[in-house]
Amino acid sequence: MNDLIKKQLDDARSSMDKSIEFCDSELIKIRAGKAMPTMLDGVVVEYYGNPTPLSSVATINTPDARTLVVQPWEKSLLVPIEKAIINSNVGLNPQNDGIVIRLNVPPLTEERRRDLVKRVKEEAEKGRIAIRNIRKDANEKIKRTKSEAVSDDEIKVGEADVQKLTDAYIIKVDKLAELKEKDIMTV
């Protein structure tokens, strides 16, 4: 196989890996009724005038399956952390006891589970679209190699390899979504 085509395949594989990682991180943010420290990954706290991720200014623990405990490294951060959690729309109500902030994760209703499954499907579709866009870009770059003395047969083989890669990564997205759906629907 031509080196130019190999490079395009490697670039496509690298981009698709990043798409899978991003899709996985987006799916993790969808809470499945269990308390997980990653639920607060998107929370940003004002820390000395700078927006700072919550995990950089506090310890987040799960003492049980339905509770998150946020312990700031400085007591002065209790109120800003509480405000940040409320403003982040994670759907949790912080309880500040002066030492730590407790967040009780309510059990999911059937309707809420269905809504979350819809969100999972939307995120999975975004992942599949990203992978297809990478395929399209890779195929265009492979076709452009024709001007650099690459034969039509090599181009066809390269495009077929990109398609195989695309299929494999779409299966990975589907598996991630399937696992998340199963997690959400498990009572």
Image (cartoon, rainbow, N blue to C red):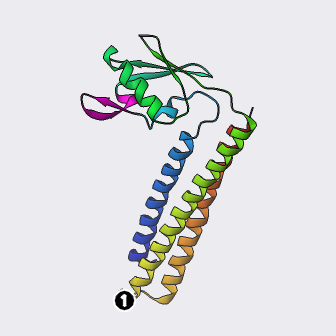
Vertical placement of residue 169 versus 178, above or below: below
The percent position of residue 182, horizontal first and vertical second, equals: 71, 41
Vertical placement of residue 144 versus 94, above or below: below
Describe residue 113's horizontal placement relative to residue 47 as left or right. right
| Magenta stretch bounds | 44-56
The percent position of residue 79, horizontal first and vertical second, equals: 38, 20
The percent position of residue 172, horizontal first and vertical second, equals: 60, 54
**Residue 182 in view, yes or no:** no
Describe residue 58's horizontal placement relative to residue 186 as left or right. left
Q: In which quarter of the image is residue 163?
A: bottom right
Magenta segment's dominant SS is strand
Please name the residue that numbered disc 1 is placed on.
Answer: 147
Vertical placement of residue 182 versus 138, above or below: above
Give the mark count.
1
Residue at 63% across, 58% down: 171
Front residue (pair 75, 64): 75
Residue at 44% across, 59% down: 14
**Residue 103 in view, yes or no:** yes
Residue type, label 1: Ser
Front residue (pair 13, 46): 46
Which quadrant of the figure contains the C terminus?
top right
The percent position of residue 5, horizontal first and vertical second, equals: 43, 75
Magenta stretch encompasses residue 75? no
